[in-house]
Image (cartoon, rainbow, N blue to C red):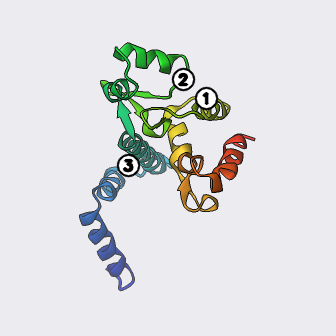
Amino acid sequence: MTAAVAPLAHQVAVRAQKDTRFAKVLDVLLTAPTTPQGTLERIAARTLSDQRRAALVEDFVDGAMRTPEVQALLKLRTPQAVHRLRSRGKLIGSALGNQTWFPAWQFDGGRMRLDLPRILELLARFTSDPLAADRIMRLKHNELGNTSIAEALRKPKTAEIAWRMLTSLGA
């Protein structure tokens, strides 16, 4: 091993020991066929895409409430009432596994946010994917004082900028 490669190999080994996702990517790369041309790139891209999707789903679930929690919060009699709100476009949610998850930013003080219909209308112009909509609402922005659109809409100081950002989606 050359002197230039040894430090890099050591860094890769150290990171692989600490980061299991990185180790899995390395494993896929090391066991992937290198011919025909492009196979390795497709395998690496698919693995990276799968990891990003898994992280997105994990983040979505971490910031969401299950159907029974929403039912209790909104004082609805049945889980079907929650799902009716979702099917009518009054709430966004996503079925993942055997649970349906609803982003918590849609609620305020034991009820649906008063500005939720407008938020959902603007999000729907850009995406119908609940995970993408949640990401848009919870991603932190420097121009909002390092807060998310969901948080910024609640503050008079940043609400106007947040509304402009939402309105400009897909424009």
- In this rendered view, identify the residue nearer to me: 81 or 169: 81
Using residue 162 as the reference point, say whether residue 86 is left or right of it.
left
Q: Which residue is mark 2?
A: 90
27 over 11 or under it: above or below: above
- In this rendered view, identify the residue nearer to me: 85 or 130: 85
The quadrant of the rendering that contains the N terminus is: bottom left
Q: What whole-number distance in Å separates the C-alpha atoms at marks 3 and 1?
A: 51 Å
Q: Which residue is mark 1?
A: 117
Q: Please provide percent x and percent y for residue 106.
A: 49, 35
* Element type at mark 3: loop
Return the residue found at the far right: 171
- Mark positioned earlier in the residue sequence (3 or 1): 3
Q: Which residue is mark 3?
A: 33
Q: What whole-number distance in Å separates the C-alpha atoms at marks 2 and 1?
A: 7 Å
- Mark positioned earlier in the residue sequence (2 or 3): 3
- In this rendered view, identify the residue nearer to me: 139 or 19: 139
Using residue 167 as the reference point, say whether residue 64 is left or right of it.
left
45 over 90 or under it: above or below: below
Contact flag, marks 2 and 1 (Cβ < 8 Å): yes
Circle 2: residue type: Lys
